[in-house]
Image (spheres, grey):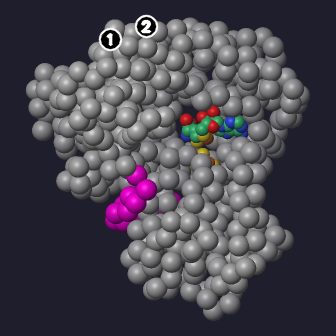
Amino acid sequence: MTNKTFYIETYGCQMNFADSEIVNSILLEEGMKPVHDAESADVVLVNTCSIRENAETKVWNRLKELRSIKKENGELTVGVLGCMAERIKDRIIEQEHLVDIVVGPDAYRDIPNLLQEVDDGRKAVNVLLSLEETYADIAPVRTTGNGVNAFVSIMRGCDNMCAFCVVPFTRGRERSRPMGSILKEIKQLSDEGYKEVTLLGQNVNSYLDGETTFTKLMDEASKVDPEIRFRFSSPHPKDFPDDLLHLIAERPNLCNYIHIPAQAGSDTMLERMRRPYTREGYLELIDNMKAIIPGVSLSTDIIAGFCDETEEEHQQTLTLMAEVEYDLAYMFAYSERERTLAARKFEDNVPEETKKRRLSEIITQQREIQERRNKEEVGRRHLVLVESTSKKSDAQLSGRTDTNKMVVFDRKDFKPGDYVEVEVKETTSATLIADPIRKTTLSEYYGAEVVA
Ligand code: SAH
Ligand code: SF4
Ligand code: F3S
C-alpha cells in the first residue's frame, strides 16, 4: 500500500466525520499519503450516510461522478465506507460496478487488507458489525479541522430502535469506549491547543463503561483542562438524570446548551415512533433543564409526516415547539428506510405534498421563534470561542457562544482559539452580530474556581 495516495470524502453526521479521522489515521499508519482531491488520488473512500433517501441519492450521484474519473484513470480504487455500506453491499458491488471495496463502520481496521485484495484483482467487502469495536486505541488524525474544535467518539451504535430510524441497522449494537482512553485523547487535544471538544455517540448520554456513567465521564473530562469547553451530541431524552444537569450548571466549561430531540409532540405519535416518553414527560424534563441550568439553550430534531400522522398530531408538534422555544431545530420530512419497524409494519401514507406543507409550517414557526429569541440577545454580553474567519468577510471572525449561537465580529487582533468577550449589537434568525470587548480566558470570565 505504501506510496499510494488517498482521499476521504465524508457525508452524514458528526460520527461519520469522526470515523473518517480514524480511517485517516489507519491509512497514514500504512504509509499512504493524503491528497486534497479525488482527481489526484489512487484511492478514494466515500464515507456514506443512509439516514434519509436524499442522503443516499447524494452519494449515488457522487459515485457515478467517480466512475467517470475511474474511466480515465483505470488504476483508481473507489471504496464505500459507513452507513450505506452496511445496507447495500450487494447492489454496490454486483449491479452497479461502481466501487471496488465496501467497508462497514466496525471494519475500518481491515481496510489495508481489503485494499491489498483489490490490488490482487478481487473486489473486497467487510461489513461485519461488532459488539466490541470502539477504535479506542486509534488516535484520530484531524487534518481537515480548524485546530480549535475536535470531536471525540465515546460510544458507538444504538439499541433504541426508534420506528423510523436506520441507525441501529447500519451501526449495530450500543457499546461504550473505556473512559481511560477517552481522557487520554482529551489530554492530547489539550496539549495540541484545542479549545472545544464535542463528545459523540448516537445515544451519547447512555454511555456506560462498567460503573462509569455519562455524568461521571463529563465530570472527569471537564477536569482535564478548564480552558476546554465541552459539548455532547446526540443525547436521548430517556437518560437525563438531575445529577448531569447540576454538573452542567456548576461547571463553567460544560456548555449550557443541550440538544434534546423530541421528534414529535403528541403521545400517539411518540408511541408509534417508539419514543419512550410522553409529551408531558418531555415538557417536564425541559422545565427541569430550564430550572437547573438558568439561560440554558435548547435544540431539537423534528420529523414531519411520519406514518398515519393526523393534522391534530401535526398541530401538537407545532405547539410543543412553541412551548419549549428552541434556539435551533433540525427539521425533516419523514423518509422511509428499509428494515426499520415503520417500513415493515406501517404504511408511509402521508402524501408527499402534505409532508412538505407540514414541514414548511414547522420551519416557518421555528424561524420566527429564533428571530424573536435572538432579538432578546441585543445588548447582552457573551464569551465567544473564536473558530475561524467569517464566511462573508475576511475582516471578521466567527465563533460561538457557550449557548451555541453563531457570532460574527470585527477581527481586530483576535484569532481562532481565543476566548473573546463580546456585546451583541444586531441579530438575524441564525447569527448574532457583536462588538468585541476584550480577550479573556474561560476561567477568568466565569470568575471560576479552577476545577483541575
Ligand atoms: N441518534 C440521534 C439521531 C441521529 S439521526 C438521536 O437519536 O438524536 C438525526 C435525526 O434524523 C433524528 O433525530 C431524526 O429526527 C432524523 N431522522 C432519523 N430517521 C429519519 C427518517 N427515516 N426520516 C426522516 N428523518 C429521520
Ligand atoms: Fe435512531 Fe432513535 Fe437511535 Fe437516534 S436513538 S440513532 S433516532 S434509533
Ligand atoms: Fe447517517 Fe449513519 Fe450518521 S445513517 S446520520 S452517517 S449514523
Does residue 144 belong to the magenta stretch?
yes
Question: Residue 284 at what x, y percent from top left?
Answer: 48, 12
Chain part drawn in magenta: 129-145
Vertical placement of residue 401 versus 118, above or below: above
Specify the farthest residue to the bottom.
Answer: 120
Name the amino acid type tagged 1.
Arg
The answer to whether the residue bearing label 1 lies less than 8 angstroms from the nearest atom of ligand 1 is no
Can you give x and y, in whole percent of width and height, for residue 251 in the image?
23, 27
Residue 422 is drawn in which quadrant?
top left
Residue drawn at point x = 31 percent, y = 16 percent: 423
Q: Are marks 2 and 1 in contact (CB under 8 Å)?
A: yes
- Classify the position of the C terminus by image quarter: top left
Q: Would you say 182 lies left or right of 300 here?
A: left
Q: Secondary structure at mark 1?
A: loop
| Residue 287 x/y as whole percent | 44, 11
The amino acid marked with disc number 2 is: Glu
The secondary structure type at the circle numbered 2 is loop
**Mark sitting on residue 376:** 2
Q: Position of residue 274 (x, y in %)?
A: 66, 31
Could you tell whether 294 is left or right of 252 in the image?
Answer: right
